[in-house]
Amino acid sequence: MPIHENLLGGPPPTHLPDEPGPRELLAGGTSPTDVAAQYPTSSLAWARLADEAFERGGVVESYAYARTGYHRGLDALRRSGWKGHGPVPWEHEPNRGFLRALHALARAAQAIGEKEEYERCTQFLKDSSPTAAEVLG
């Protein structure tokens, strides 16, 4: 039996391709605004913008940034073979931008009273990566 065989019969985990540019710029202190402008498909940059906006009380702004990062992440997942469900492991670092954007969208949706979207995004995060749901809270 192959070591990576999925014994549960579900879809295999999706691993997004590595995009070191945005991650390295953010780690080096470049503002998320500048990174998002240079790499507009980076879910990580949009998630960081969402986090910063939320922390300063800009909940609607956070929601907009998170929604952008979420949709950019969905596009990337689909390009990587994702069929709308299945694991998106937190352990694979390139997946973290999407998972962070999904978490930020749930958080902002809750803050603006979008209960159904909050519940849907929270469940989607748990289904995609229980580790991400635990780590991100």
Image (cartoon, rainbow, N blue to C red):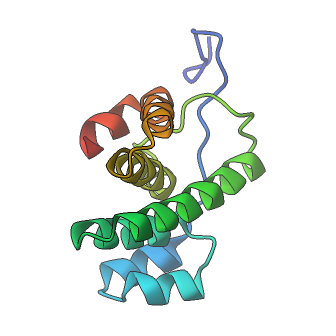
Image location (x, y in percent) of residue 42? 56, 70
Relative to the observer, which residue lies in front, 81 or 52? 52
Along the horizontal axis of the image, is 129 left or right of 29? Answer: right
Work out whether 66 lies above or below 109: below
- Residue at screen point 25% across, 40% down: 137
Work out whether 113 lies above or below 17: above
Work out whether 47 lies above or below 135: below
Q: Quadrant of the N terminus?
A: top right
Work out whether 73 lies above or below 20: above
Q: Quadrant of residue 125?
A: top left
Q: Quadrant of residue 118?
A: top left
Image location (x, y in percent) of residue 48? 38, 69
Relative to the observer, which residue lies in front, 83 or 94? 83
Along the horizontal axis of the image, is 4 left or right of 24? Answer: right
Image location (x, y in percent) of residue 131? 33, 34
- Residue at screen point 35% across, 48% down: 107
- Residue at screen point 51% across, 32% down: 120
Image location (x, y in percent) of residue 106? 41, 45
Relative to the observer, which residue lies in front, 100 or 55? 55
